[in-house]
Image (cartoon, rainbow, N blue to C red):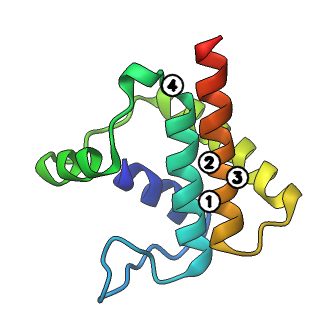
Amino acid sequence: MRSAFEAWAQKDGQIVRRREDKPEEYLVYETQRRWLIWQAALEHGKSPAGRKSAKDASARAAAQRPQAIAAADAEVRNEVLNEVLDAFQGIGANSMDDIMHVIQGLKQKKAQSTAD
């Protein structure tokens, strides 16, 4: 998942260099913000049964080599990500707390829609 994000981000002109002290975070704030949004968009699109915890996902990602994404899947993910990025820009999120609040709202909205 991270390799797909980095390929997309580089194509969009983002710097994908990671921090030396925290390799799970990106050096540039905007790239880190987009990474969080990317994860939220993918998580928002999954069914509740298909969701895994962040700990499980990071362990699984570390154990597996990045896989190539089918062209159709990449287009859908890119479209969803761009829609989510537009939504974030529309609310004027200026801090990671604002972003995390929106992400939690998306998760709650998805959970409520699947519960109904």
Asked if marks 1 and 4 touch (Cβ < 8 Å), the reply is: no
**Image coordinates for residue 90, horizontal then vertical, percent:** 88, 56
* Quarter location, residue 101: bottom right
The residue mark sitting in front, 4 or 3, is 3
- Circle 1: is it few (<14), some (14-19), or many (20+) Cα within 10 Å? some
Q: Is residue 95 left or right of residue 40?
A: right
Amino acid found under the numbered disc labelled 1: Met
Asked if marks 1 and 2 touch (Cβ < 8 Å), the reply is: yes
Amino acid found under the numbered disc labelled 3: Val
* Quarter location, residue 13: bottom right
SS assignment at label 4: helix
Query: Which residue bears the numbered disc 1?
Result: 100
| Closest to the observer, 75 or 42 | 42
SS assignment at label 2: helix
Q: Give me the residue at 54% from left, 50% from top.
A: 38
Nearer the N terminus, badge 4 or badge 3?
4
The residue mark sitting in front, 1 or 4, is 1
As displayed, is residue 27 above or below residue 35?
below
Q: Give me the residue at 37% from left, 24% from top.
A: 50
Amino acid found under the numbered disc labelled 2: Gln
Query: Which residue bears the numbered disc 4?
Result: 72
Query: Which residue bears the numbered disc 2?
Result: 104
**Image coordinates for residue 45, horizontal then vertical, percent:** 55, 29
| Closest to the observer, 99 or 115 | 115
* Distance in Å between CA atoms under marks 1 and 4: 29 Å
Asked if marks 3 and 2 touch (Cβ < 8 Å), the reply is: yes
